[in-house]
Structures are given as C-alpha cells and as structure tokens.
Amino acid sequence: MQTPTATKPLWQTYLLFLAPMVLSNFLQSMSGTVNSIYIGQMLGTQALAAVSGMFPVIFFFIALVIGLGAGAGVLIGQAWGAREAHMVKAIAGATLLLGVLIGLAAAVLGSVFARQALQGLGTPTDVLDDAVAYAHVMMWILPSMLVFVLFTQLLRGVSDTVSPLLALMVSTCVGLALTPALIRGWFGLPQLGIQSAAFAGLAGNLSAMAWLAWRLIRKQHPLAPDREFFAALRLDGAILGKVLRIGLPTGVQMIVLSLSELVILALVNQHGSQATAAYGAVTQIVNYVQFPALSIAITASILGAQAIGAGRLERLAPILRTGLLINVCLTGGLIVLGYLLSHWLLGLFLTEDSTRAMAEHLLHIMLWSLLVFGFQAIIGGIMRASGTVLVPVAIAIICVVGVQLPAAYWLDGQYGLQGVWMAFPVAYLGMLVLQTLYYKLVWQHQKIERLV
C-alpha cells in the first residue's frame, strides 16, 4: 500500500486502486444477478418480483453505512497520506462501532415493519407474502452485511482494495454454491425457497469476515483486528463529529436516493408484477455499469484525500482529469456492451418473452445516461476529499426530489411505464451541470486544509 507520494504515473496509481474495486463491484453484481437467475429460473417470475421489491428497503439501511464509510474514508485517507497510523486506527474503530449499532437497530426496525413497508410500496398482492418472508430474513442478516460493507470502505482509505476483493471472492463462492442447494434441498439441506439467497449470503458474509481477519492479522495490516484495533472500538465524540460532518450529508443523499427508488418502485408496481420483475432485471444490468462509475468517484475521493494529507494540492486537478477520462473509457465501454448484449443478458433471468422485451426497452431508454452520472459523481468525489459535501449533496437531492420524481410522475402519465425511466437522464444531466458550476465557480477558489 502506497500513498500518493509514490512516483508512479497517476493513471497507474488510479488503475492499481481501481481495478480490484471494479472487480469487487463486478462480483457483487454477479452474485446478485446469479441469485436472480437461480430464483427466476428455479422458482419463477413471481418469486423474482418478490425479491426485487425488497431491494430499495435494504438499500435504505445500507445508505446510512455508505455515508459513514464515505466520511471515515476521507479522514482515513488524509491521515494515511500524512503517515499517521494511530489516527487511522482511531477513526476506523469509532466508525465501525457506530456501524454495528446502526446494523442492530436496522435489524429490529426492519423486521418489525417489513409488511407495512412493502404494503406501502404497493407490492403486488400475489407476491406480498413471499416478499415479507424474504424481508424478515434479510433484515436479520443485515448487521453482518453492513459491517462487511463498512469495513471494506475503511480498508480503501489506506489504499487497500485487494483485501476487500479477495474477501468478496470468498463470500461470493460460498453464497453461490449454497443458494441452489438451499432452493432444491440438495445434500440433505432444507428447502428454503426465495429465502435461500438470504441465508446463503449470511454464510458467505461470515466466512469472508473470518478469512479477512486472518489475512489482515497475518500481514500486520494497519487495520488488522488486533489488540490495538479493539482498543480503538469506542465512540470517540471528536472523531465521530468529523466523520458525521462529512458522512451524514452523504448518508442523507443516499437515503434520498433510496427513497426516490421507493417512489419509482411504487410507480412501477402500479403496472403489475410483470413490470416489477422487469424493474428487477433492469436494475441488475444497470448495477454493472453504475457501480464501476461510482468506484471511479471513490478512487478520486480517496486519492484526493491522500494528496491533501500529504500536502500535495497540485495533484487534485490531475486526479480529476484522470478520473473523467477513465469514466469515458470504462463506463462508456460498459454502456456499449450493455446495448449490444441487452437481449441476451436480460434473457438470463427473465423467462417470459413479453417481460424480457419490456425490460430491454426500459434499459435502452436510460443506460446511456450512466456516463453522465459518472461524470458528476467524480466531480463530487474530488470536492468530498477536502470535506466539502453540503452543496454537492444539496445539488444531488434537489435534482432527485425537484427534477426526477416530478418528471417520473408526469412522464408516467404521458408515456406509461417507459416514462418513469425517461426521468433518470433528466436528473443526471441536471446534476452534472450544477456540480460543474459549483466546482468551477466556488470550490476551486476555496482554501483547502487537512481535517485531521
């Protein structure tokens, strides 16, 4: 692991950091996709609709932890750039303990109110009971999922993207092997229906965390779960204040995005379970493009934070330019593949021709706009590296609440289901214009200082 003071060309530093993260995102997306294929092919379209309806609810809780990780990642990146290992542990310990408490609260609240939440979303009645049964299991395994997600974000703050990748490989292999076995009851295992993927995911998460702890201790990693690390597991008010100052706005942004997805899903559900299944299928394909774009933004933010910690502010502009160029190449390339292979990809987990045709049409409407989404995310990531989050987050929220949702409602009335997807490009273009204006006119003229 190296700080930005290394002499590598910037594009090499970017790719060395980015490649394992993109592969991690690919594995995450692949795991979700293969599980959807298992459910769609082995249990049917209605089962897929039941599982798809739970995704925004899970994302709502994950958003809180992603916000924490974003705030802690900036602070850890600055401390790591300044070569202050003790501060790295202190930030990680305080953040991780808060994440555990959030996970436990989410498990209780989510399991108690699962049915009400799904009914409020307008989940079709023919899949409601299955959706509730799946939701109960997902809520109780949520703490382990949140801890895993948060810890991998903390590792990236010290430029370690390889350990999260290897841990995710363990989790994915265990989960994908167990899911069909639990669906069919192979090897004497119980038949668990659509809950199979959730239980398999829990086994994968626990296996991955155990393996990750062993690897970090063996390598004497700066974030190894050793005696010093456990001593840092305390709710340090000063540290958490800084983490929340950066992370809370990001978490709020993620929550608003998740709430907007709930509204979008409610609009989709009005068109029936076939439309809900199409929504789930489109989401799977979009993840393969959107997550790499977000990975580039995270890379820009971490490298920017490390540069600030090392006192090398002149690297910020090149980091931004390199990120934008990589977005063109990587995200743009994935978009092209998405258009070329959409019919085949959607057919992997949608067995009904009419549902697949619907999903393909919806995907084609908004897929191109993920390139625009990547541009605005990278610009926001650079500003986040300095602790500037309030205005970029406000821009995103305004574009979602004030542009996307009204447009989705209006376009749904004008064009039906396809109108809902037309609102995504409109919102992303608004975000890019406003983020760019704030970056050029305000942020570039501010004084940038270390936060820790």
Image (spheres, helix red, strand yellow):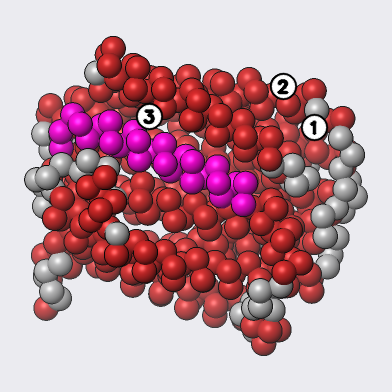
Task: Tell me which label, 1 or 3, sits earlier in the chain.
Answer: 3
Residue to which mark 2 is pinned: 437
Q: Name the residue at the bottom extreme.
A: 227
In the image, is residue 188 above or below residue 339?
below
Assign a secondary structure to mark 3.
helix
Instruction: Please indicate whether residue 74 sits to the left or right of residue 7 in the image.
Output: left
**Position in image of residue 321 (x %, y %):** 73, 30
For the residues marked 3 and 2, what is the alpha-carbon distance in whole angstroms? 30 Å
Disc marking residue 434: none
Q: Secondary structure at mark 2?
A: helix
C-beta proximity under 8 Å, tags 2 and 1: no
Q: Given the image, on which type of amino acid does mark 1 rest? A: Trp
For residue 175, say whether it is visible: no
Disc 1 to disc 3, C-alpha distance: 35 Å
Q: Position of residue 315 (x, y in %)?
A: 83, 40
User: Going 66% across and 78% down the picture, which residue do you hit?
Assistant: 234
Magenta stretch?
Answer: 248-274
* Tag 3–tag 2 contact (CB < 8 Å): no
Residue 285 in the image: above or below residue 102: above
Determine which residue is flagged by label 3. Answer: 338
Residue type pointed to by label 2: Leu
Name the one closer to the observer, 306 or 221.
306
The residue depicted at 26 percent of the width and 45 percent of the height is 120
Residue 64 shown in magenta: no
Residue behind mark 1 = 443
